[in-house]
Amino acid sequence: MARTRSEERRAEILRAALEVIAERGYRGATLGSVAERVGLTQQGLLHYFPTKEALLVAVLEERDRWDTSGGRDREGWRLDLLESLVEYNAMRPGIVQTFSALLGESVTDGHPARAFFTERYAQVRANMADVLRLEFGERLPGGLTPERAAPLLTAVMDGLQYQWLLDPASVDMPGAFRDFLRLLAGSAER
Amino acid sequence: MARTRSEERRAEILRAALEVIAERGYRGATLGSVAERVGLTQQGLLHYFPTKEALLVAVLEERDRWDTSGGRDREGWRLDLLESLVEYNAMRPGIVQTFSALLGESVTDGHPARAFFTERYAQVRANMADVLRLEFGERLPGGLTPERAAPLLTAVMDGLQYQWLLDPASVDMPGAFRDFLRLLAGSAER
DNA sequence: ACCCACCTACCTGTAGATCGGTAGGCAATG
DNA sequence: CATTGCCTACCGATCTACAGGTAGGTGGGT
């Protein structure tokens, strides 16, 4: 097999870490609880990831790989794929919760994920601008350019996630997202 | 004086707690560091707030009082006041950071602020719907109702805060918010 | 005389990390 | 072929550092 036992172990650990971080955030997560989930001791876990921060970094890197491969190609997303992504997320509260918790923590001082998110959001905004340009051209409703609308699109996705995580029954995340896209499409009826 | 020394102390402590939570989140904040900031020992602090959670609750309650008094009256916000609020927030990264960090944490399991935020967002959405109805009537662009647009408005505010906190130089939070309002106003030019 | 506003001392728990192993596999070597 | 040696994958014990919380004070103001 191409995949060694060790690589499998690492993958298991990352999956477990994702879960634990979703439940407790990074600061609240303990190496012990991650280890327990994969049938290791804390010290055994540290054999694979030498520090807690290294584990977090690995989690973030894996997310990045996922984002950069599945569903996205060199030309970036298309708007309907974004819509599918939101629908997909609505079925995976765990993953959404992990990254929402991490995003929230990351704004605190010296958080190890801060640089990651800062960089990533710059990329995401650039991507969103491309997507919008591809879909709507240079001029959007309200006189917006794709660059001006990109932070809004990004903000809506994130903001909706928080509302949805807090109260899934009251917030139709995919529906609301589609609503926003309709706003951007500029069906100007009043 | 109407305000007793003890009440002043509490207010000081709450202010300090706000700062520390902004810097480290709730889980990362320690009673000791809050105490230090007001020239107390950790145990001295516990004299005023018997547990860490009690302190958090007090912080949240104060925020609620602030929200419910300043700028908002029985009829709720108006849209231009919301705009001012965003501008005001853009000058107070500390407060924004506190509540963004708390919101992020609150989606994790058993977080003491979770109920607070869940309830609060329901209120906020209802309020936003009122504001939108007052400003735009029943029909918004894209065929939206005020109720459908309210989660979007809320999401934009929160989402922009994260982007702005991570990279203030790259995100013009008030400007972006105004852009969104323009979308809602439905100036349909393309 | 009493209470309020604290403090010192202490306890308990927990978390991340280090140290020093051990057991098994595998390859080179005498 | 067996021994030696080394590498990987762990575990137990332990260290250090806090963190939250308790118990029992002390001192000053009313």
Image (cartoon, coloured by chain):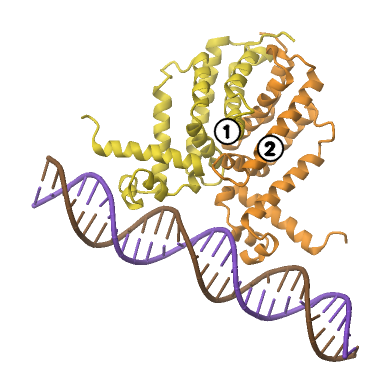
Chain colours: A orange, B yellow, C purple, D brown
Q: Could you tell whether C3 is left or right of B81 in the image?
A: left
Q: Is residue A86 visible?
A: no
Q: Amino acid at mark 1?
A: Leu
Q: Is residue A116 left or right of residue A5?
A: left
Which residue sits at x=64%, y=32%? A158
Residue at the spot of label 1: B165
Rounded to the nearest angstrom, the CA distance separating label 2 from label 1 is 13 Å
| Residue name at image x 62 percent, y 42 percent | A114
Residue B144: percent from left, percent from top: 65, 16
Q: Is residue A131 left or right of residue A13?
A: right
Tell me where residue A180 appears, x and y as whole percent: 68, 22
Residue B95 appears in the picture as rendered: yes
Of the pair B2 and A81, the residue shown nearer to us: B2
Which amino acid, mark 2? Glu
Q: Residue at x 54, y 35 (%)?
A: B100
For disc 1, the chain is B
Q: How many residues crowd mark 1 within 10 Å: few (<14), some (14–19), many (20+)?
A: many
Question: So how many labels did they put on this image?
Answer: 2
Chain bearing tag 2 is A
Q: Which mark is residue B56?
A: none
> Vertical placement of A156 versus A137: above or below?
below
Q: Which residue is mark 2?
A: A119
Q: Say which element carries label 2.
A: helix
Task: Mark 2: give few (<14), some (14-19) or many (20+) Cα within 10 Å.
Answer: few
- Residue B173, image quadrant: top right
Circles 2 and 1 on the same subunit: no
Q: Quadrant of the N terminus of chain A?
A: bottom right
Residue B18: x and y in percent read 43, 38
- Report the residue at 73% width, 12% height from top: A187
**Element marked by disc 1:** helix
